[in-house]
Amino acid sequence: MCILNVKTLTNKLRKFKKKRGIAFDQDPTDQRWLWKEARLKDVDGNQLILFSGGKNRLNPPWRIENK
């Protein structure tokens, strides 16, 4: 499995689909952990996850502050 953070996920995937004809197993989907994810497999069947976490990647609303 390979996970890649993509800042503008939806726009990048439109370009991949249109210009390169890449098929995705899961289109960009809002997840309950506040990230948007898309999934596909490479030619060897390895799972690739492209995500955009935005500000929630480093500072999620459920984060416990160190005091």
Image (cartoon, rainbow, N blue to C red):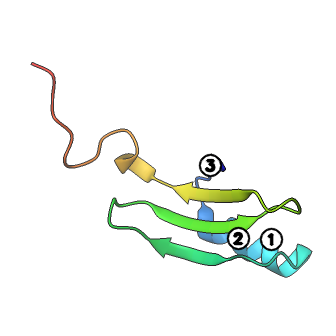
Q: Is residue 16 above or below residue 53?
A: below
As drawn, the residue found furthest toward the top would be 67
Evaluate if marks 1 and 2 touch, with contact meaning CB atoms under 8 Å apart: yes
Write the residue at 58% across / 53% down: 7
- Which kind of residue does numbered mark 1 sit on? Phe
> Does 36 sit left or right of 11 as displayed?
left
> Does 65 sit left or right of 23 as displayed?
left
- Quadrant of the image containing the C terminus: top left
* Numbered label attached to residue 64: none
Number of numbered markers: 3
> Does 29 sit left or right of 17 as displayed?
left
Residue that numbered label 2 is attached to: 13
Q: Position of residue 48 (x, y in %)?
A: 69, 57
Tell me which label, 3 or 1, sits earlier in the chain. 3
Q: Position of residue 65 (x, y in %)?
A: 15, 29
Q: Is residue 17 above or below residue 67?
A: below
Q: Position of residue 53 (x, y in %)?
A: 45, 53
Please tell me whether mark 1 sits on a helix, a strand or a loop.
Answer: helix
Please tell me whether mark 3 sits on a helix, a strand or a loop.
Answer: strand
Which of the two marks, 3 or 2, is nearer to us in this view? 3
* Numbered label attached to residue 16: 1
- Which kind of residue does numbered mark 3 sit on? Ile
Of residues 22 and 7, the one nearer the viewer is 22
As drawn, the residue found furthest toward the left would be 67
- Which kind of residue does numbered mark 2 sit on? Leu
Q: Position of residue 54 (x, y in %)?
A: 44, 52
Residue that numbered label 3 is attached to: 3
Which of the two marks, 3 or 1, is nearer to us in this view? 3
